[in-house]
Image (spheres, rainbow, N blue to C red):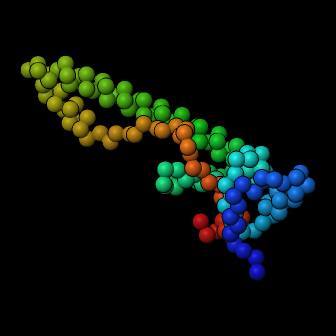
Amino acid sequence: MKPELLILDEPTNHLDIDTLSWLEQYLQNYTGAILIVSHDRYFLDKVVNHVYEVSRTSMKKKFAGNYSKYLELKAEQLERDMKLYEKQQEEISKLQDFVDRNLARASTTKRAQSRRKQLERMDRLDKPLGDEKNPQTFILILRDKAAMMC
């Protein structure tokens, strides 16, 4: 009976080239799920086809592709999130400035109150965290049967 899940913690430590090549080939052909904790990026690029990011006690996202693709997609997402956050902060600043300048004036009080309500109703975005000092990122490879379960 073949296991459906392999859990590998730093599987490339202390392996010679021949054994490492065998392990890469074995994992590429493995039909179950594999959980890999590794710092060997070259190895991860060779055997990974899905990355699940687990960070600060929650599973954040699933990325399709190898580890390098995951890093690329994560950087793009961070850039998009940061732009959205900065755009919203700019809008908040403009609205707050308008409220501060116009609330006391009789001629613009209604508009200032309307903008203040708009500020209160606004769903505020959290500032993107970017790279964490101690990220906990786990790599999970999915193949055949295991891919259908997720």
- Decide if residue 30 is in sight here: yes
Residue for point 38% across, 39% down: 125
Numbered disc total: 0
In the image: residue 105, left or right of residue 72: left
Picture coordinates of residue 14 (x, y %)?
81, 53
Residue for point 65% across, 58% down: 140
Quadrant of the image for the C terminus? Answer: bottom right
Picture coordinates of residue 103 (x, y %)?
14, 23
Q: Note whether 49 is above or below 98 in the view shown.
A: below
Q: Nearer the viewer, residue 48 or 92?
A: 48
Q: Residue furthest bottom?
A: 1
Residue for point 48% across, 31% down: 83
Q: Note whether 42 is above or below 90 in the view shown.
A: below
Picture coordinates of residue 94 (x, y %)?
30, 24
Q: Note whether 150 is above or below 62 in the view shown.
A: below
In the image: residue 110, left or right of residue 67: left
Q: Nearer the viewer, residue 6 or 28?
A: 6
- Decide if residue 142 is in sight here: no
Residue for point 38% across, 32% down: 88
Picture coordinates of residue 66 (x, y %)?
71, 49
Q: Quadrant of residue 142?
A: bottom right
Q: Nearer the viewer, residue 123 or 32?
A: 32
Q: Residue furthest left?
A: 106
Q: Residue furthest right?
A: 18
Quadrant of the image for the N terminus? Answer: bottom right
In the image: residue 107, left or right of residue 42: left
Q: Quadrant of residue 6?
A: bottom right
Q: Nearer the viewer, residue 13 or 44?
A: 13
In the image: residue 28, left or right of residue 54: right
